[in-house]
Image (cartoon, helix red, strand yellow):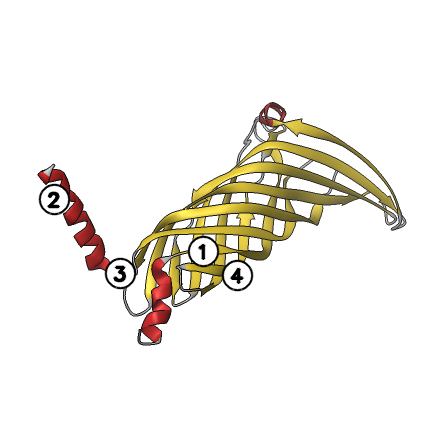
Amino acid sequence: MKKLLLMISIFISINLSLSAASGFEAIINVPFGIAVGIPMGQIAGSTRKINTGFDVGVTAQFGYVIDLKNNIGLSILGESGYSYDTYSYATSSDSTTKIANSTSFHSFQIGLLPKLNIKDFSIGFGGGLKIPIAGTSEDRTTTHGTNYTASGSTMNMITIVNKYDKMNVIPYIKLTFDYSVFNNYNIGANFGMYFDYEFGVRQKINEKKYTSVDSFGVGLQIGLRFSPFNTWQMKKDGL
Protein backbone atom coordinates (compact mmCIF):
# COMPACT_ATOMS: atom_id res chain seq x y z
CA MET A 1 0.00 0.00 0.00
CA LYS A 2 2.86 2.40 0.81
CA LYS A 3 4.46 1.69 -2.58
CA LEU A 4 1.13 2.30 -4.32
CA LEU A 5 0.65 5.63 -2.53
CA LEU A 6 4.21 6.61 -3.40
CA MET A 7 3.64 5.85 -7.09
CA ILE A 8 0.41 7.88 -7.08
CA SER A 9 2.19 10.79 -5.40
CA ILE A 10 5.00 10.71 -7.98
CA PHE A 11 2.47 10.63 -10.82
CA ILE A 12 0.56 13.61 -9.40
CA SER A 13 3.80 15.52 -8.83
CA ILE A 14 4.88 14.99 -12.45
CA ASN A 15 1.55 16.26 -13.73
CA LEU A 16 1.64 19.28 -11.47
CA SER A 17 5.17 20.06 -12.55
CA LEU A 18 4.05 20.20 -16.17
CA SER A 19 1.44 22.81 -15.41
CA ALA A 20 -1.81 23.33 -13.61
CA ALA A 21 -3.35 23.82 -17.07
CA SER A 22 -2.37 20.33 -18.27
CA GLY A 23 -4.81 17.47 -18.00
CA PHE A 24 -7.67 15.51 -19.54
CA GLU A 25 -9.46 17.13 -22.48
CA ALA A 26 -12.66 16.19 -24.34
CA ILE A 27 -14.42 17.81 -27.30
CA ILE A 28 -17.81 16.92 -28.78
CA ASN A 29 -18.28 18.33 -32.30
CA VAL A 30 -21.02 18.38 -34.93
CA PRO A 31 -19.35 18.98 -38.34
CA PHE A 32 -21.36 19.76 -41.48
CA GLY A 33 -20.25 20.96 -44.88
CA ILE A 34 -19.89 20.56 -48.64
CA ALA A 35 -18.10 17.62 -50.28
CA VAL A 36 -16.63 17.89 -53.78
CA GLY A 37 -16.48 14.46 -55.41
CA ILE A 38 -13.29 13.78 -57.40
CA PRO A 39 -13.53 10.77 -59.77
CA MET A 40 -10.47 8.51 -59.77
CA GLY A 41 -9.69 5.81 -62.32
CA GLN A 42 -11.38 5.35 -65.68
CA ILE A 43 -14.60 3.73 -66.88
CA ALA A 44 -14.61 2.73 -70.53
CA GLY A 45 -16.86 4.93 -72.68
CA SER A 46 -17.49 7.45 -69.89
CA THR A 47 -15.95 10.81 -68.99
CA ARG A 48 -16.59 11.64 -65.35
CA LYS A 49 -16.52 15.12 -63.84
CA ILE A 50 -16.53 16.51 -60.31
CA ASN A 51 -19.85 17.02 -58.54
CA THR A 52 -20.92 18.23 -55.10
CA GLY A 53 -22.61 16.59 -52.13
CA PHE A 54 -22.65 17.15 -48.38
CA ASP A 55 -21.22 15.72 -45.14
CA VAL A 56 -22.52 15.69 -41.57
CA GLY A 57 -21.63 13.79 -38.42
CA VAL A 58 -20.95 13.70 -34.68
CA THR A 59 -17.41 13.23 -33.36
CA ALA A 60 -15.87 12.89 -29.90
CA GLN A 61 -12.23 13.77 -29.26
CA PHE A 62 -10.54 12.57 -26.06
CA GLY A 63 -6.98 12.94 -24.85
CA TYR A 64 -4.47 14.97 -22.88
CA VAL A 65 -3.52 18.62 -23.17
CA ILE A 66 -0.03 19.80 -22.16
CA ASP A 67 0.70 23.41 -21.22
CA LEU A 68 3.90 24.50 -22.96
CA LYS A 69 3.84 27.92 -21.22
CA ASN A 70 3.35 31.39 -22.76
CA ASN A 71 -0.29 30.61 -23.59
CA ILE A 72 0.68 27.75 -25.91
CA GLY A 73 -0.39 24.14 -25.45
CA LEU A 74 -0.42 20.81 -27.24
CA SER A 75 -3.46 18.52 -27.31
CA ILE A 76 -2.95 14.83 -28.13
CA LEU A 77 -6.43 13.63 -29.05
CA GLY A 78 -8.02 10.46 -30.33
CA GLU A 79 -11.16 10.87 -32.42
CA SER A 80 -14.17 8.63 -32.96
CA GLY A 81 -17.75 9.08 -34.05
CA TYR A 82 -20.42 8.78 -36.73
CA SER A 83 -20.12 10.25 -40.22
CA TYR A 84 -22.51 10.56 -43.16
CA ASP A 85 -20.62 11.35 -46.37
CA THR A 86 -21.54 11.80 -50.02
CA TYR A 87 -19.26 10.92 -52.95
CA SER A 88 -20.67 12.29 -56.18
CA TYR A 89 -19.65 12.66 -59.84
CA ALA A 90 -21.37 13.68 -63.05
CA THR A 91 -21.32 12.57 -66.70
CA SER A 92 -22.90 14.21 -69.75
CA SER A 93 -24.20 12.20 -72.70
CA ASP A 94 -25.04 15.35 -74.72
CA SER A 95 -25.56 19.10 -74.24
CA THR A 96 -29.03 18.67 -72.72
CA THR A 97 -28.62 15.56 -70.55
CA LYS A 98 -26.66 15.29 -67.31
CA ILE A 99 -26.27 12.10 -65.28
CA ALA A 100 -25.19 12.41 -61.66
CA ASN A 101 -24.11 9.45 -59.55
CA SER A 102 -24.17 9.86 -55.80
CA THR A 103 -22.97 7.25 -53.30
CA SER A 104 -23.53 7.96 -49.62
CA PHE A 105 -22.20 6.06 -46.61
CA HIS A 106 -23.03 5.85 -42.92
CA SER A 107 -19.63 5.23 -41.35
CA PHE A 108 -17.91 4.63 -38.04
CA GLN A 109 -14.96 7.01 -37.77
CA ILE A 110 -11.73 6.58 -35.79
CA GLY A 111 -8.47 8.55 -35.91
CA LEU A 112 -5.95 10.88 -34.27
CA LEU A 113 -6.12 14.68 -34.22
CA PRO A 114 -3.23 16.49 -32.45
CA LYS A 115 -3.87 20.21 -31.92
CA LEU A 116 -1.69 23.23 -31.26
CA ASN A 117 -3.45 25.62 -28.88
CA ILE A 118 -2.65 29.35 -28.90
CA LYS A 119 -4.74 30.99 -26.21
CA ASP A 120 -8.34 30.12 -27.15
CA PHE A 121 -7.50 29.22 -30.76
CA SER A 122 -6.63 25.67 -31.90
CA ILE A 123 -5.10 24.32 -35.10
CA GLY A 124 -5.43 20.58 -35.62
CA PHE A 125 -4.01 18.22 -38.22
CA GLY A 126 -4.56 14.47 -38.25
CA GLY A 127 -6.21 11.56 -39.97
CA GLY A 128 -7.78 8.18 -39.62
CA LEU A 129 -10.26 5.76 -41.12
CA LYS A 130 -13.96 5.77 -41.88
CA ILE A 131 -15.50 2.29 -41.91
CA PRO A 132 -18.75 2.19 -43.95
CA ILE A 133 -21.52 0.17 -42.30
CA ALA A 134 -24.39 1.06 -44.67
CA GLY A 135 -24.96 3.14 -47.77
CA THR A 136 -27.01 4.07 -50.80
CA SER A 137 -26.19 4.58 -54.47
CA GLU A 138 -28.33 6.72 -56.75
CA ASP A 139 -28.23 7.76 -60.42
CA ARG A 140 -30.15 10.88 -61.44
CA THR A 141 -30.68 11.80 -65.09
CA THR A 142 -31.61 15.43 -65.75
CA THR A 143 -32.86 16.53 -69.17
CA HIS A 144 -33.09 20.19 -70.27
CA GLY A 145 -32.24 21.26 -66.71
CA THR A 146 -35.67 20.45 -65.24
CA ASN A 147 -36.95 16.92 -65.84
CA TYR A 148 -35.15 14.11 -64.09
CA THR A 149 -35.48 10.44 -63.28
CA ALA A 150 -33.76 8.56 -60.49
CA SER A 151 -32.85 4.97 -59.69
CA GLY A 152 -30.88 3.60 -56.78
CA SER A 153 -30.08 0.83 -54.35
CA THR A 154 -29.15 0.33 -50.71
CA MET A 155 -26.07 -1.42 -49.33
CA ASN A 156 -25.27 -3.12 -46.05
CA MET A 157 -21.79 -3.76 -44.70
CA ILE A 158 -21.44 -7.16 -46.42
CA THR A 159 -22.51 -5.66 -49.76
CA ILE A 160 -19.95 -2.88 -49.37
CA VAL A 161 -17.12 -5.32 -48.58
CA ASN A 162 -17.96 -7.47 -51.61
CA LYS A 163 -18.54 -4.60 -54.05
CA TYR A 164 -15.46 -2.54 -53.20
CA ASP A 165 -12.96 -5.39 -53.30
CA LYS A 166 -9.96 -3.12 -53.99
CA MET A 167 -10.43 -1.08 -50.79
CA ASN A 168 -13.59 -0.96 -48.63
CA VAL A 169 -12.51 1.51 -45.93
CA ILE A 170 -12.00 5.27 -46.33
CA PRO A 171 -8.69 6.79 -45.14
CA TYR A 172 -8.83 10.54 -44.53
CA ILE A 173 -6.66 13.50 -43.53
CA LYS A 174 -8.06 16.61 -41.88
CA LEU A 175 -7.10 20.19 -41.00
CA THR A 176 -9.17 22.07 -38.39
CA PHE A 177 -9.34 25.60 -36.99
CA ASP A 178 -11.27 26.18 -33.74
CA TYR A 179 -12.09 28.96 -31.29
CA SER A 180 -13.36 28.18 -27.79
CA VAL A 181 -15.34 30.40 -25.41
CA PHE A 182 -15.04 29.11 -21.83
CA ASN A 183 -17.11 29.62 -18.70
CA ASN A 184 -15.85 29.22 -15.14
CA TYR A 185 -16.27 25.42 -15.09
CA ASN A 186 -13.68 24.30 -17.67
CA ILE A 187 -16.44 23.92 -20.27
CA GLY A 188 -16.47 26.00 -23.45
CA ALA A 189 -18.49 26.45 -26.61
CA ASN A 190 -16.41 25.34 -29.60
CA PHE A 191 -16.71 26.99 -33.02
CA GLY A 192 -14.60 26.08 -36.01
CA MET A 193 -14.11 25.00 -39.58
CA TYR A 194 -12.45 22.01 -41.24
CA PHE A 195 -10.88 20.92 -44.50
CA ASP A 196 -10.52 17.22 -45.26
CA TYR A 197 -9.57 14.86 -48.05
CA GLU A 198 -11.04 11.35 -48.16
CA PHE A 199 -9.70 8.49 -50.27
CA GLY A 200 -12.93 6.83 -51.38
CA VAL A 201 -13.69 3.12 -51.52
CA ARG A 202 -12.22 1.45 -54.59
CA GLN A 203 -13.88 -1.02 -56.94
CA LYS A 204 -11.62 -3.24 -59.01
CA ILE A 205 -12.13 -3.27 -62.78
CA ASN A 206 -9.30 -5.70 -63.52
CA GLU A 207 -5.96 -6.63 -62.00
CA LYS A 208 -4.39 -3.28 -62.92
CA LYS A 209 -7.31 -0.83 -62.87
CA TYR A 210 -9.82 0.40 -60.32
CA THR A 211 -12.44 3.14 -60.05
CA SER A 212 -13.43 5.29 -57.09
CA VAL A 213 -14.56 8.76 -56.04
CA ASP A 214 -12.39 10.71 -53.60
CA SER A 215 -13.78 13.72 -51.76
CA PHE A 216 -12.52 17.15 -50.73
CA GLY A 217 -14.65 18.61 -47.96
CA VAL A 218 -14.95 22.02 -46.33
CA GLY A 219 -17.37 22.95 -43.61
CA LEU A 220 -18.16 24.28 -40.15
CA GLN A 221 -18.30 22.56 -36.78
CA ILE A 222 -19.88 23.49 -33.46
CA GLY A 223 -19.69 21.73 -30.13
CA LEU A 224 -18.58 21.63 -26.51
CA ARG A 225 -15.04 21.48 -25.15
CA PHE A 226 -13.93 20.39 -21.69
CA SER A 227 -10.36 21.55 -21.03
CA PRO A 228 -8.23 22.95 -18.19
CA PHE A 229 -6.97 25.58 -20.63
CA ASN A 230 -9.61 28.13 -19.65
CA THR A 231 -6.99 29.03 -17.00
CA TRP A 232 -5.40 31.06 -19.80
CA GLN A 233 -8.22 33.52 -19.36
CA MET A 234 -7.49 33.68 -15.63
CA LYS A 235 -3.79 34.31 -16.35
CA LYS A 236 -4.70 37.05 -18.79
CA ASP A 237 -6.92 38.68 -16.20
CA GLY A 238 -4.29 38.29 -13.51
CA LEU A 239 -6.36 35.88 -11.38
Q: Residue at x 55, y 31 (%)?
A: 168
| Residue type at tag 3 | Ala
| Residue type at tag 4 | Phe
- Circle 1 packing at 10 Å, graded few (<14), some (14-19), many (20+), is many
Of pointers 2 and 4, the one earlier in the residue sequence: 2
**Mark 3 lies on residue:** 20
Q: Position of residue 138 (x, y in %)?
A: 75, 36
Q: Position of residue 101 (x, y in %)?
A: 73, 40
Closer-to-camera residue (133/217) = 133
Q: Residue at x 54, y 49 (%)?
A: 197
As measured in the structure, the alpha-carbon distance from the residue carrying label 2 to the one carrying label 4 is 42 Å
Q: Position of residue 56 (x, y in %)?
A: 61, 47
Which one is in front in this view, the residue at disc 4 or the one at disc 3? Answer: 3
Of pointers 3 and 2, the one earlier in the residue sequence: 2
Where disc 4 sits, the SS reads strand
**Mark 1 lies on residue:** 225
**Mark 2 lies on residue:** 6
Which one is in front in this view, the residue at disc 1 or the one at disc 2? Answer: 2
* Whether label 1 touches label 4, CB < 8 Å: no
Which one is in front in this view, the residue at disc 2 or the one at disc 4? Answer: 2
Of pointers 4 and 3, the one earlier in the residue sequence: 3
On screen, residue 151 versus residue 33, left or right, reads right
**Mark 4 lies on residue:** 191
Of pointers 1 and 4, the one earlier in the residue sequence: 4
